[in-house]
Image (spheres, rainbow, N blue to C red):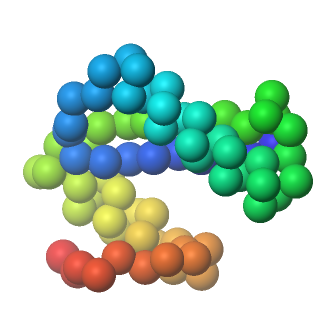
């Protein structure tokens, strides 16, 4: 039951763009995990640049480095 949780700076996506993103991510997850399409879920949440450090960078990037499989090329 893979779940992908995407957080990003605000960017407007059309419903078609959101669906295309979810479809492409689902395709990779199904291929790499051997999952079924129906078992994959994808969420997209916009975080303001002002909140990024406290909402994402500190708790999820710095605070969970053991789980990162790709580290960002920036620091705060």
Above or below, 71 relative to 15: below
**Of residues 29 and 46, which is closer to you in this image?**
29
Residue pictured at 73% horizontal, 37% vertical: 40
Residue 12 seen anywhere in this rendered image of the structure: yes
Residue 6 appears left or right of 58: right
Residue occupying the far top of the picture: 15
**Of residues 25 and 49, which is closer to you in this image?**
25
Above or below, 43 relative to 72: above
Q: Quadrant of the N terminus?
A: top right
Residue pictured at 38% horizontal, 18% vertical: 15
Above or below, 32 relative to 62: above
Q: Position of residue 38 (x, y in %)?
A: 80, 28
Q: Quadrant of the C terminus?
A: bottom left
Residue 52 appears left or right of 62: left
Residue 62 seen anywhere in this rendered image of the structure: no
Which quadrant of the view contains residue 44?
Answer: top left
Q: Position of residue 58 (x, y in %)?
A: 34, 68
**Of residues 17 and 41, which is closer to you in this image?**
17
């Amino acid at each position: 039951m893979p779940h992908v949780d995407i957080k990003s700076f605000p960017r407007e996506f059309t419903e078609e763009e959101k669906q295309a993103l979810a479809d492409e991510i689902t395709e990779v997850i199904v291929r790499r995990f051997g999952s079924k399409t129906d078992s994959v879920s994808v969420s997209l949440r916009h975080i303001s640049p002002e909140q990024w450090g406290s909402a994402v960078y500190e708790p999820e990037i710095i605070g969970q480095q053991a789980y990162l499989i790709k580290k960002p090329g920036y620091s705060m």
